[in-house]
């Protein structure tokens, strides 16, 4: 899947977000090394602290389906060029230290970066 389509998918899947508290629907589309794409949305809870971001939902869904290698993730949210939060950066780094990231917006525009650029000098048990 090309970059534009990956961002479009991240944007389209936002309609499935469960974000009644923030009213900030986020979507993610994770391209796996086997060529498949796994999506995720943010799922919020009425109990503070239990909500999960779209990026982590996508990664955890993919892992639960047996996927282990990830190439690229597109993220889209209502504001311009969605930046993964710090918690998601750590999880993304642990599962894909060379991951490419497309930070998209609802118009389908995106800024390209990498997890290495977003989380330099990351924590690792193997350090
Ligand atoms: N959110 C994500 O899903 N991904 C991010 O990278 C940043 C924030 C969600 C969490 C919460 O449901 C809403 O956006 C507002 O913070």
Image (tube, helix red, strand yellow):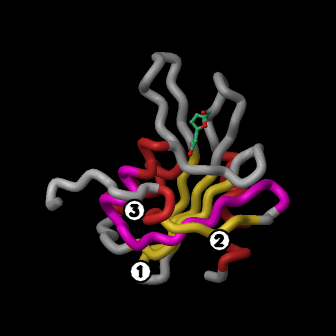
Where residue 10 appears, x then y in whole percent? 65, 60
Pointer 3: what residue?
62
Disc 2 to disc 3, how far (Cα)?
A: 16 Å
Mark 2 against mark 3, which lies toward the viewer?
2
Give the total of numbered labels.
3
User: In which quadrant will I find the C terminus?
Assistant: bottom left
Pointer 2: what residue?
6
Mark 3 against mark 1, which lies toward the viewer?
1
The dot on residue 66 is none
Check disc 2 and report its element: helix, strand or loop. Answer: helix
Q: Residue furthest front?
A: 121
Where residue 108 appears, x then y in whole percent? 79, 64
In this rendering, position of residue 109 left or right of residue 63: right
Check disc 1 and report its element: helix, strand or loop. Answer: loop
**Residue at horizontal 72 percent and vertical 54 percent from the top:** 81
Among the two numbered marks 2 and 3 on one chain, the one whose residue lies closer to the N terminus: 2
> Dots 1 and 2: beta carbons under 8 Å?
no
Judged from the image, the quadrant occupied by ligand 1 is top right
Q: Residue furthest left?
A: 126
The dot on residue 33 is 1
* 99 within the magenta span: yes
Please provide the residue range marked out in magenta.
90-107
Q: Quadrant of residue 12?
A: bottom right
**Residue at horizontal 68 percent and vertical 40 percent from the top:** 25
């Amino acid at each position: 899947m090309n970059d534009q389509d990956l961002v479009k998918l991240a944007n389209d899947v936002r309609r499935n977000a469960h974000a009644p508290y923030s009213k900030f629907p986020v979507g993610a589309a994770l391209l796996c090394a086997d060529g498949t794409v796994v999506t995720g949305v943010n799922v919020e809870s009425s109990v503070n602290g239990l909500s999960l971001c779209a990026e982590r939902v996508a990664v955890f869904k993919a892992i639960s389906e047996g996927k282990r290698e990830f190439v690229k993730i597109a993220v889209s949210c209502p504001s311009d060029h969605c930046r993964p939060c710090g918690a998601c950066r750590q999880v993304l780094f642990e599962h894909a230290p060379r991951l490419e990231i497309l930070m998209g917006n609802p118009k389908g525009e995106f800024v390209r970066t990498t997890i290495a650029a977003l989380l330099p000098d990351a924590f690792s048990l193997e350090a």
